Image: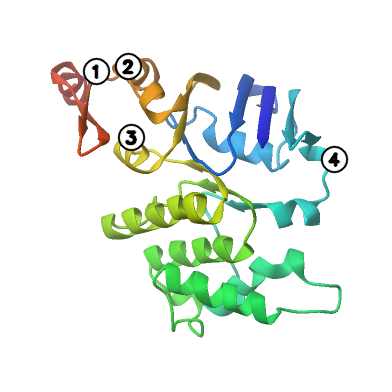
Amino acid sequence: MIEASRVSVAYGHTPILFDVTARFTPRRLTALVGPNGCGKSTLLKAIMDFVPLTGGTITLDGEEIRSIGRRKLARRVAYLPQESHCPDYMTLGELVELAGFARYSLFGGPSAKDRELFHDALDIVGLAGMAHRQVNRLSGGQRQRAFIAMILAQDAEIVLMDEPVNHLDMKYQYATLDLIGNLTRNRGKTVVTVLHDLNLTTAFADDVVMMRDGRIVASGSVRETVTQDTVAQVFDLDADIFERDGRLVCLPGAKGRETIAA
């Protein structure tokens, strides 16, 4: 379990997170939602120990993240940032092979199991047969799926994703989030992902952490957390929330449409 306890973070003299406490339950998909700039991405970076804490602690199964070595942490936690880059000359196959680095010995390379993971990851994201293609020759959506394949091939027990479906069309948004959900249901992985679309959140997430201005407004299961009151608090939006085919749907109410128009 990943647990953040009273975590605060600042960039220089600018506070970003304030006294954040959250638990991410194993084998569930947790969505971080909230307005731009509310601290969602910073929370993921803090979990990865990419930014120093000005207060509080973050632990993985009771051990402070900052005391875990990078290589050991990479075996347990995979991280997909909001923007990913690689050298122009790198092929898709070479990119995905990077996923196994934390498992390789000093003089070793990919094992047969690693190569099977690489192949399966490319197949899952719809890029099978394209391992020879240079990443810079892929479309924007294909590149995003390529980096998702790399994260899947890392085969870590915990996966952190910052807006993984941001550059994908609707078909691959649903396919990717369905895949991510299957990681929790069928492979026992823990997934924490930043999402902007509340309807994607209610369709695919198990739990939700709603943030605003560097603080957590609400957290818990989807049905406990995504309510008219919390949507109004977090997004300043009057919303109608109703159930259809067993899932919650969020649409702007009459006042919400007036707010958007204004």
> Would residue 89 be visible to someone looking at this image?
no
Percent of width and height locating residue 3 = 67, 30
Viewer-side residue, 223 vs 231: 223
- Secondary structure beneath label 3: helix
**Which residue corresponds to mark 1?**
238
**Which residue corresponds to mark 4?**
67
Measure the C-alpha gap from mark 4 to mark 1: 44 Å
What residue appears at the point 75 percent right and 67 percent down from the top-left corner?
A: 103
What residue appears at the point 60 percent right and 34 percent down from the top-left corner?
A: 43
Instruction: Tell me: residue 41, above or below residue 211.
Output: below
**Which residue corresponds to mark 2?**
232
Viewer-side residue, 193 vs 133: 193
Measure the C-alpha gap from mark 3 to mark 4: 35 Å
Viewer-side residue, 216 vs 61: 61
Q: Are marks 2 and 1 in contact (CB under 8 Å)?
A: yes
What residue appears at the point 85 percent right and 40 percent down from the top-left corner?
A: 67
Measure the C-alpha gap from mark 2 to mark 4: 39 Å
- Secondary structure beneath label 2: helix
The amino acid at mark 1 is Asp
Instruction: Tell me: residue 47, above or below residue 181.
Output: above
Measure the C-alpha gap from mark 2 to mark 3: 13 Å
**Which residue corresponds to mark 3?**
198
The amino acid at mark 4 is Ser
The amino acid at mark 2 is Ala
